[in-house]
Amino acid sequence: MPATVVDAVKTPYPCPCNCHEVLTLDQRTAGIAALYRFDDAMRGWGQTVLWDLAASTLWRLQQQLADVKWVAVRDGACLHSRLLGFCVHELVHVMCGDPTLPNYGTPVGLPYGVPEHVPPSEEAAYLHRFNQNEARAWVGLAAVAYRLFEIEWPLLPARDVGTYGFAGGNALVEVPAGYRAVPHYDHHHHARRYYALAQKLEEEARGWFTPAKLDEIATKFEAAEAIGRASRPVTFPAPRENGATSPEEARPQRPVRVRFDA
């Protein structure tokens, strides 16, 4: 079976941001409580969160399988800043789609490809909605984390800019069967163009997080959380108990084990 949220919070590892030392015990406790609540809400929506240290690999498998309700969130050592950042990022994606569908209803071949039926002339327009949602998930970390969990310390995203598919360049990425790769600008080969487009998109996305929208997000989240909490598969230990665990006390990393026959 894949690792659970309990496994994750019991295994803090040393990380570059040194969040275990920088944050107080009260802050670490609040962060773990937020991870529990995230896990409950996703379960309430019918999603399975994978907490193993292999999010990028599991995401590629999800692309191939297409119809699985996986949410892979942990791809590094950092527990209190980056892992929680990943989870809040996913929550914004949930709110931009249908939380009960695989990948929240977003085609798994995005952002670097489109379904084969989409004409080349419509590629940019097709990708735009995905780009908008990605920008919201990118810039909304602080606002959503505070509204839902009263988290005030900085949360870390995957890298320094969102993952967007800007049609028009010449970069190509392999896409799943049934999709057509779209030549696009990427942040390696077309850095100036990519960052300019990303900045504009993210500036627009900040306006989406109005007080009314944040209240709506909280209402949906709390409803799913209540359902998920009632069906926890195991007893979650007190957040403070695990918040006090230091990286040196954690057991060795677990290998990824994913069953496909379940």
Image (spheres, rainbow, N blue to C red):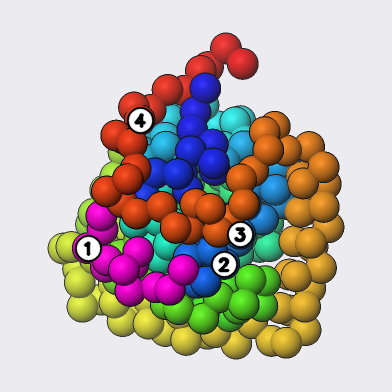
Residue depicted at 47% across the width and 86% down the height: 203
Cα–Cα gap, marks 1 and 4 = 20 Å
In this rendering, would 100 be left or right of 175?
A: right
According to the picture, the residue beneath numbered tag 4 turns out to be 254
Magenta stretch bounds: 14-25
- Closer to the observer: label 4 or label 2? 2
- Closer to the observer: label 3 or label 1? 3
Q: Which of the 4 image quarters holds residue 166?
A: bottom left
Closer to the camera in the image, 133 or 92: 92
Cα–Cα gap, marks 3 and 1 = 23 Å
Amino acid type, label 1: Pro
Closer to the camera in the image, 198 or 49: 49
According to the picture, the residue beneath numbered tag 1 turns out to be 16
Amino acid type, label 4: Arg
Q: Is residue 178 magenta?
A: no
According to the picture, the residue beneath numbered tag 3 turns out to be 33
According to the picture, the residue beneath numbered tag 2 turns out to be 30
Q: Residue furthest top?
A: 261
Cα–Cα gap, marks 4 and 2 = 25 Å
Q: Is 139 drawn above or below residue 248 in the view shown?
A: below
**Is there a contact, CB below 8 Å, between mark 2 and mark 1?**
no
Q: Is 241 drawn above or below residue 166 in the view shown?
A: above
Mark 1 neighbour density, 10 Å: few (under 14) some (14–19) many (20 or more): few
Name the element at disc 2: helix
In this rendering, would 12 be left or right of 211?
A: left
**Is there a contact, CB below 8 Å, between mark 3 and mark 2?**
yes
In this rendering, would 5 be left or right of 229?
A: left
Q: Choose the circle earlier in sequence order: 2 or 1.
A: 1
